Amino acid sequence: MPLSVAIVGPGRSKQGTGPFIARVFMQLGCDIQAIVSSSLESAQDAVENLTNEYSIKCKAYATLDELLDKNSIDIVVISSPADTHFDYLHAALKKGCHVFCEKPLWWSNEPLKSLNDIERITSEAINLVTICNASQLVLQLNTQWPYTLPTYYELYPQLIKQSTVETFSMWLAPQSRDDKMIIDSVSHILSMLYTLVGTGKINNIESNFAQLTSGDDLLIEFNFLHAFGDTRVSISLAASDTFPKPAAYAVNGLRVDRHVELPDYLISLRTTDNQLPVVDPLECSIKNFISTIHSKASSDEVAIIDGMTHLAQIYQEVTQTKYQNSSNGKNT
């Protein structure tokens, strides 16, 4: 019997991934049974779009609780805005559903002012992992960038022989602005780091966030200390409404740019003198998730716990200087 799937956030507003995720799950033999959106009306519109574009016929609901009460669901996909994830995660796990979630795992509008706030986020992530382990449920982030690395190494085979990753850089163009760029983008960088060098510790965070003006790229740098050495990481974020989004990364200074060919969304990596196609990273991510469920393997605790801890650490360190300066300015 195919795995039954419910999708939270199935629309394309703000370049959402919900419809594409639904299509891949269907292509991989899953049954898309129901969807939840911000309102029943928008859910019904999404059902119509999924039917017209991908021949996916499913039911529309206004809340996830109602959906899970009325349907037997194996997998809940969460592709709604990050500040809605937390409640959806707990609702899905409470009902015994596996969860495939967009990055970041969740985010809260509560301020991060101290180490205690970061420890609270770490504790919440550990709690989610504990729930999954106790119920033999798989919780996985939609992690796509690491699946481009085989193509990257085809373009730069000399890197396979290098034992250390001295530097890692990434250029992204989120649709969000200001501090929301950090929330929307940093998890992508972290997923690449964990794949390249494993878990580690972040130190020496630097940023131009406090001096950021309209039109400037947000620059973030830090050291990532891991079992194989110390990698200097740099992130450049340029807010953009264009689609597809420009993106690139470099290991030890060797850069590739992502190229997307529309309308089929064919992805390739491009250097200054070469270009190679990439197997659809979204399909790879979902295949890995389904395989993890069938093999009864556990969730990736590094991706879940360290991912949230490091995101919170970077966000707090980058933003607190600007907000402290603003507070000090009001007091003078």
Image (cartoon, grey):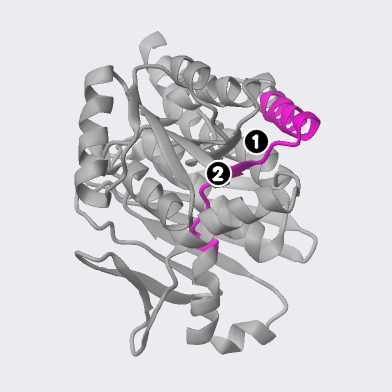
Judged from this view, the residue extending furthest toward the front is 1
The kind of secondary structure element at disc 1 is: helix
Please check the rendered image and state whether residue 273 is part of the magenta-colored stretch, yes or no. no
Q: Nearer the viewer, mark 2 or mark 1?
A: 2
Q: Which secondary structure is most common in the magenta stretch?
A: helix
| Magenta-tinted stretch | 122-146
The picture places residue 211, in percent across and down from the top left corner, at: 35, 38
Please state if 290 lies on the left or on the right of 21 as rendered: right
Please check the rendered image and state whether residue 133 is part of the magenta-colored stretch, yes or no. yes
Q: Is residue 201 above or below residue 177?
A: below
Q: Which residue is mark 1?
A: 309
Q: Is residue 304 above or below residue 34?
A: below
The picture places residue 306, in percent across and down from the top left corner, at: 68, 41
For residue 247, what is the image quadrant? bottom left
Q: Are marks 2 and 1 in contact (CB under 8 Å)?
A: no
Residue at x-position 55% and y-position 81%: 153
Alpha carbon distance from label 2 to label 1: 32 Å
Q: Residues within 10 Å of mark 1 (few under 14, many from 20)?
A: many
Q: Which residue is mark 2?
A: 3
Dot 2 amino acid type:
Leu
